[in-house]
Amino acid sequence: MDADVIIVGAGPTGLMLANELCIAGVKPLLLERQERLRETPRANGLGGRILELLHYRGMLTDLHAASTDPHPAPRFPFGDVHLDLRHLPDPPMRAVQIPQPRLERLLEERVEQLGTRVLRGHEVVGISQDRDGVSADVRCADGPHRVHARYLVGCDGSRSRVRDQAGISFPGSTFPEVNRLSQVTLAEGVRRCDNGELEAPGAGRLSPGFTRTDQGVFGFGWLTEEVLLISTTESEATGYGDDVPMTLAEHQDSIRRVIGAELPLGKAIRLSRYQLQDRQADRYREGRVLLAGDAAHLFPATGVALNAGMLDAVNLAWKLAGEVRGWAPAGLLDTYQTERHAAGARTLLHTRAQTALRRGHDPAAEALRDVFRELLLDEASLRRIGALVAGSDIRHPVPGQDDHALTGALVPDLALDTGRDVTTVAQLMRPARPLFLDLADRPELRAIAERWAHRVNIHTAGTHDRPADALLIRPDAHIAWAAPVGAPSGTLLPGLEHALGTWFGSPRADVEPHDQPGDALDVPRTLAFTTPDTTGAGTE
């Protein structure tokens, strides 16, 4: 084998997957068709639940340092409506402004620090698999060659060759509207008003946000004091191929058609044209071939694809590592399909709703938008929609573990007091290893967890207003098991043992199970705050 896992595509999803696999002690081979990193940003920011996961990996500080605006105001488009979360003290959706090339460079540098590099100019032209592994036929400057691995993951975008070669269908539709996007500097004669409006000769004053006309939708927002993000949406019969780049003049013509006036544009920083698609692969796995990111799903709204794709990567990596390293219990890798396909379907739900809010032009459509705006005046509704967009309302189903509200959800970043140190859940999650967290000094529960100490980090700490007596946390920071506060041992021990085996395989052979809960009382307190294995490798 040339590698444990071949990753096809070095966008944010592929790079995040490589990062997570490296932490888990798995060697990926990262192949990218493009010869160099793209300089033109396909996205200008990152938002939603993935920011919490990056915080748990200790990467959020570097992301903020590389950002053009690490803490933008939490106001986000939802169709032709805006989710204005600025008055909430704890918005359910946050974002970081960072051009995609800068994000990719940051992720690639981290992967290189972990001992893996991106092989650019390597195009995968064919794949085949058998019971033992996957082969990829690669074309590069040195000529064609073949590489082999245990598994292969297609992170190669919407036109995924991996998906096609694996025979995975990609049902859905492409919407007829043509969307054009420009990131431009202020042109001479155009000025920014104190209230954020844009004033231009001939066009008058234009308000930030979306303006609907009989010809389409015009929108703009400020990236900086001197840089604008301008968009237009029009229904057109003409199709455009990816090989026909958009020009500044083309977007100026589109703006003229939509608002009926000339809007001078300055220097172009980014120009793009796209049609929104509504697609999801019917399955994310075919044997030893898996899909993540745009290869698995396309959403008919902007601002969610990076969040969804990188979350795919975090969910998949530790499960794939378990398979490669031989400790994965039966069915573990299948839970990637179960969990992330459902999450993708939920993202499709709200992006389809955005399409309905955006597309209509008749009085009924205007009434729908007005009613939706009224609903967003209620904090509960605003929070619900914000969490939906962020992907933070996802709770993975955990069969047989429905007795606690936290089970299946992302663990909150609790402040923890060990009696010697003050730490946080985020700090304990940095090694990306499973974590058993005893919040109520329950030695009988720790004794069960100790049988999996070769694979699970074990800590005891107090926290203010604890949500549970103990938590079993997966490497992707989702809670696999939780002990209700004050629950008796007899009801907890079987469930904890089952959860440990379900998610993390067999217990260590040289540790015998305790027949009675009382046997665990002699467990030494040195387990209270063990040092995390920062290699993420453990002893298999």
Image (cartoon, rainbow, N blue to C red):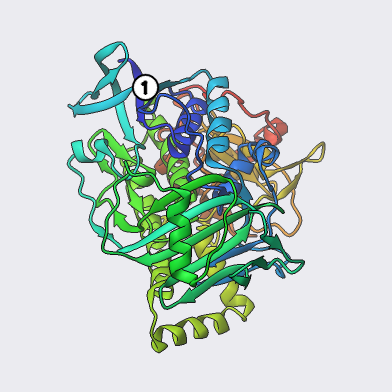
Q: Could you say which is closer to the camera, residue 247 or residue 99? A: 247
Q: Could you say which is closer to the camera, residue 460 or residue 514? A: 460
Point 55% across, 52% down: residue: 49
Residue type (three-letter) at the residue carrying disc 1: Gly
**223 on left or right of 289:** right
Vertical relation: 366 (above or below) 509: below
Image quarter for residue 269?
top right
Point 53% across, 73% down: residue: 211
**320 on left or right of 207:** left
Q: Could you say which is closer to the camera, residue 280 or residue 45? A: 45
| Mark 1, secondary structure of its residue | loop
Q: Residues within 10 Å of mark 1 (few under 14, many from 20)?
A: some
Residue most extreme to the top: 142
Vertical relation: 34 (above or below) 178: above
Q: Position of residue 146 (x, y in %)?
A: 24, 16
**In the rendered image, which quarter contains the C terminus?**
top left
Point 37% across, 42% down: residue: 292
Image quarter for residue 141?
top left
Whether residue 206 is visible here, answered yes or no, is no
Report the number of numbered marks.
1
Point 81% across, 40% down: residue: 419
Q: Position of residue 393 (x, y in %)?
A: 51, 62
- Residue hosting label 1: 121
**In the rendered image, which quarter contains the N terminus?**
top left
**64 on left or right of 239:** right
Q: Position of residue 119 (x, y in %)?
A: 41, 20
